Image (tube, rainbow, N blue to C red):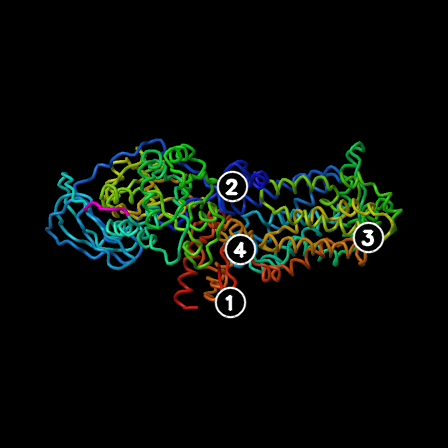
Amino acid sequence: MSQYIVSSSPHIANKRTVSGIMLEVLIALAPAVIASVIFYGFYALFLEILSVGAAVGTEALYNRVMKRDQTVKDCSAMVTGLLLALNIPVSAPFYVPVIGSAFAILFVKMLFGGIGKNFANPAITARIFLLLAWASVMTSFVKPILWSGGAKEIFKYFACIVKGPSGLGDVAAVTSATPLASLREGAEKVKDLPLLAMFLGNTGGSLGETSALAVLLGGVYLIIRRIIDWRVPTVYLATVALFAMIYGAAKGAVGAYILPSLLGGGLMLGAFFMATDYATSPNTKTGLVVYAVGLGLITSLIRFFGNYPEGVSFAILLMNIVTPFIDKFIRPRPFGFVKQGKGGAK
Amino acid sequence: MFTLRAFTCYNIDVFGGIDLKFTFKRGIHPAGNKQISKDVPLAVFPTPAVVSIPLSQHIGAPAALAVAVGDEVKVGTLLGKSASFVSANVFSSVSGKVTSVVKKRTAIGTKCDHVVIENDGRYEEVFLPALSEITAETVKARVAEAGIVGMGGATFPTHVKLSPRTPVDVLIINAAECEPYITCDYRLCLEKAKEIMEGVRYMMIALGVDVAYIGVEDNKPDAVRALSEVAPENVRVLSLVTKYPQGAEKQLIYSVTRRVVPEGGLPADVGVVVDNVHTAFAVYEAVALNKPSYQRAMTVSGRMCERPGNYFVRNGVSYEDIASYAGMKEGTMKVISGGPMMGFAQADLAPSTGKGTSSLLFLNDDEISDGDKPISACINCASCASHCPMRLMPMFIERAVEEEDASKAKALHALSCLECGCCAYVCPASRPLVLSMRRAKKLIKEKGV
């Protein structure tokens, strides 16, 4: 043994680590978590903690059982768990985020080899799984709480803990229509949408989707910290806006659809936090643009012409699957690249 | 900040008009740490009583032993004769007696013969004969005769570079010194600007070029000033953007001329020859002073060094002697010959200095990255690709190496890798990517794809 460390160059490195990146994402999600508590009370926080716990627990247990190195310290399971919780309505019973997180970590992440090896975003895939398994729970949206209403009001959604939306008893409190569903009901209805409420979050929706502002704050933070590439959210949102404009023009109201499309549903959360997953998005800047345009198109097509009111999850899952092909066909040309068989460089 | 950098690509008034800033795309910004040694003037390193001079201080064939044990040598006596075109003469750096020839490990980990000389402390000199006239041919012959190699660290024999296979029109002198810590070229620019300019003139004569550029990173404005003051009209001193690896040959050519060296090609293919600023100084000494290459300016630095500084060190001084003179502190974690990005970690202090030893660093735990980041699986963040100055995709090359797929590695252009280390520097999963790149090259060579 030598008295000095002998290792390959480089001998210095920057400070960014995997867990550091994941912690930055958690910081960026803080505004959305805070918004979910403001609008839906402490049951929202309870679901989020449960979901994170289930995700971390599943990964830890899997590693233990399979005798793999423990990887929970990289914090990526926490991000998956929290993202999944933010995709669930507050009226969900406690087992929905637990089962969803366990599904995301076990079937989408760990069975494919763990971090970096998953073919699709775990949280998105789990959301789709939950949507199919508990359709009514996943599409029942309730009204925000009133903080002036006392403890009973602030904690009222704990009534959903076992029975889900039916635990509320009051059918009128449950509305199945999110603002997004109005998109297909004609330009008049779209014009009546409460845009400010959709931006701030004072409306029905899942925990993290309700406030576009909160998600936007976190997303901008991630871009500034250079955790995510600005291209994906920017091009994704721009494509959706452009499509909404064209659709609006066909309906005789050019501008009417743009803001509802951008602010409604899971678009913001998907564009900044889910579509930007490293493992499932292309590795080149050009590839990212192609990917983001694809996301925008699929999202808009499902929203305006499909059977589901929301298309973000399906768009991300589909484009995740396309990602390896994008990476196969879009490769950066090395510095000094010479095309073979064309006479070489000058 | 990320956006500001994107908008400052345009620099007003470079040559009296709007021009691009002198830089390349991608790369990294490591902490420079040059303040440790930059203000210490070049001093003569006290040569110890015994030196052991490696016969391979250059890329190419080791020099053939030209002395025998027991011979009396002087400063400038030929110890090893250039063994082929791509090789270089090796000279004695002291006067005294050859006591033995031993096989020893060099700083880069290979073994070669070292001529061990007992230093009599008199430093009697036998230099080369004076040149009767200065022409392209005589300068080239003198550079070969004097054993001059690329002194930036690559140690490629300079006479080969001065005989390009295609005509060239530009000489670029590399004074970027983009590696952290190293300041010997900077000191040389400040203290020997006139001599450097003479050397550049001789090299321009040898190459028959009309224009030369000297590229200095803009974190050394006083070096730019010192060189500019003595630069003739056809030598332009350029302030380059401070970014690693600004001093990498192909990147420097792009920064200065916007020419792109084709993959697998040489700078001469785009009409350029690049030489290090210290090489220019060595050419001056060989042509004007008839001095062969037997010593060099060298930085000794790092936070575990009590007396960091810049020294003229004769070839063959052991790292042990440098460590004791510069005051290597107890608890040094890593000893690096060269810079922290591309230098070689030393297992012990046995190797000796040579023509390419630009620095010796004594580093503590805080300065090095070993153990700082947990090594985890690749998370596919593509940081390595987005910082690679050669626009490669290191994460895919690493995967090809794991699959032992040589043709895939080659298709991913692994052979173009500079091993500059940007990929490993930024990797959040702390993947040993440079090691993978080396393994990829080896694999391609072995399988002959």
| Mark 4 or 3, closer to the camera | 3
User: Badge 2 is on which residue?
Assistant: B21
Q: Is residue A43 left or right of residue B77?
A: right
Does the magenta portion include A123?
no
Q: Residues within 10 Å of mark 4 (few under 14, many from 20)?
A: few
Marks 4 and 3: same chain? yes
Q: Which numbered disc, 1 or 3, marks the residue that appears first in the sequence?
A: 3
- Identify the subunit bearing mark 1: A
Tag 2 secondary structure: loop
- The label number, if any, that marks residue A341 in the structure image: 1
Q: State the image coordinates of residue B20 (x, y, percent, origin top left).
A: 53, 42
Tag 1 secondary structure: loop
- Identify the subunit bearing mark 2: B
Spatial distance from mark 1 to mark 2, Cα to Cα?
34 Å
Task: Inspect the image, locate mark 2, and give the three-letter code of the amino acid beneath it.
Answer: Lys
Q: Residues within 10 Å of mark 1 (few under 14, many from 20)?
A: few
- Identify the subunit bearing mark 4: A
Q: Which numbered disc, 1 or 4, marks the residue that appears first in the sequence?
A: 4
Q: Which image quadrant: the C terminus of chain B?
A: bottom left
Q: Which residues are magenta?
A: B129-134
Marks 1 and 3: same chain? yes
- The label number, if any, that marks residue B366 in the structure image: none
